[in-house]
Image (tube, rainbow, N blue to C red):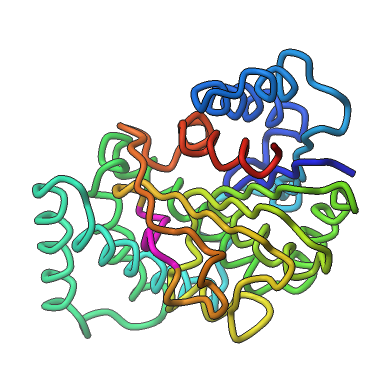
Amino acid sequence: MARIVLVHGIAQEQKSADTLEAEWLPSLAGGVRLAGDPALADELWRDARPGAARMAFYGDLFRRDGQQGGADELTAEEWGLAGALAAEWLRNAASSAAREADRARAQAELARLTADRGEEQGVRAAARPVLNALVRLRPFARLGVAFAERVVVKALKQVTLYLTDETIRNRVQDRVAEHIGPETEVIIGHSLGSVVAYEAAHLHGRPLPLLLTLGSPLGLRTVVYERTRPQPPSVPPGVARWVNLADRDDLVAARPDLTPLFPGADGVLDSGYIVDNGAKPHEAAFYLAKRRTGEVLSAALR
């Protein structure tokens, strides 16, 4: 059981709870230190006590030993969801990207996709042009199209698996539940981990001072929002405060303000903050190291 439960996101299958704690905790402590709480910062990292903060690791559940990763692993249903999710990311970039050039590029890609619609058949063929358009945007373009596509497809695979495979979903939630108890005061989730953390807060059933979500796809209505548990979505009843942080260029974070989507948000959900993570807008460590992250964590644990 832990006072702070950490929940990671996609593409962590080659890591472990220990390696992720070693990555997250110095950044989290740094954000708290910037917020003016050096005692808590030291408690989290330099003088860390056993059980103070633990990573709920589930990345290994997505590892398929002896199999090659990539597009061929997607089922027809997953290809359909992957195409819908990629399209929503593209629309988000077209309307919300910080740079005008990025918005214009995304808008041009959407216009081209609209013009070409109907030329391909089948869910995989229909999803392919959307994925190709997505990987031409920053930050994927700098990786090269072939590598970027593998990254995007792997990410989409893990998101869709969690949302559609009951066995995976239950096993992931079991991993989180192992660290939650009466002493738990904060759950922090990044990326897909924010969806996991949100659902875990519903299942927790006890008062929780803080739910902190970073780079969250919870606002992706066509794919994620309508598949969260329980339905209809709402603020977890035991949560005293829910803070959601997003970088404007983080395509995974569909919208910075989740308040209209979650009944019960008044006075609980604080979702209007925008942070700047520079060239890596979805990077977990960059979210954790922000002063705003440190401020809300320090306030919850004070």
User: Magenta stretch mostly in which secondary structure?
Assistant: loop
Q: Quadrant of the C terminus?
A: top right
Q: Is residue 268 above or below residue 64?
A: below
Is residue 158 visible to us here? no
Image coordinates for residue 243, horizontal then vertical, percent: 53, 54
Residue 224 in the magenta stretch? The answer is: no
Q: Which residues are magenta?
A: 251-258
Image coordinates for residue 200, horizontal then vertical, percent: 74, 63
User: Residue at 26% across / 41% down in the picture?
Assistant: 141
Is residue 74 visible to us here? yes
Task: Pick the residue in front: 261 or 86.
Answer: 261
Q: Quadrant of the N terminus?
A: top right
Residue 76 in the figure: left or right of residue 12? left
Residue 254 in the magenta stretch? The answer is: yes
Q: Is residue 97 above or below residue 294?
A: below
Image coordinates for residue 275, horizontal then vertical, percent: 36, 41
Residue sticking out furthest to the top: 46
Image coordinates for residue 131, horizontal then vertical, percent: 33, 60
Residue 53 is drawn in which quadrant? top right
User: Residue at 55% across / 60% down in the picture?
Assistant: 157
Task: Pick the residue in front: 286 or 268.
Answer: 268
Q: Is residue 155 above or below residue 20?
A: below
Residue 198 in the figure: left or right of residue 108? right
Residue 24 in the figure: left or right of residue 206? left
Residue 37 is drawn in which quadrant? top right
User: Residue at 57% across / 67% down in the picture?
Assistant: 160
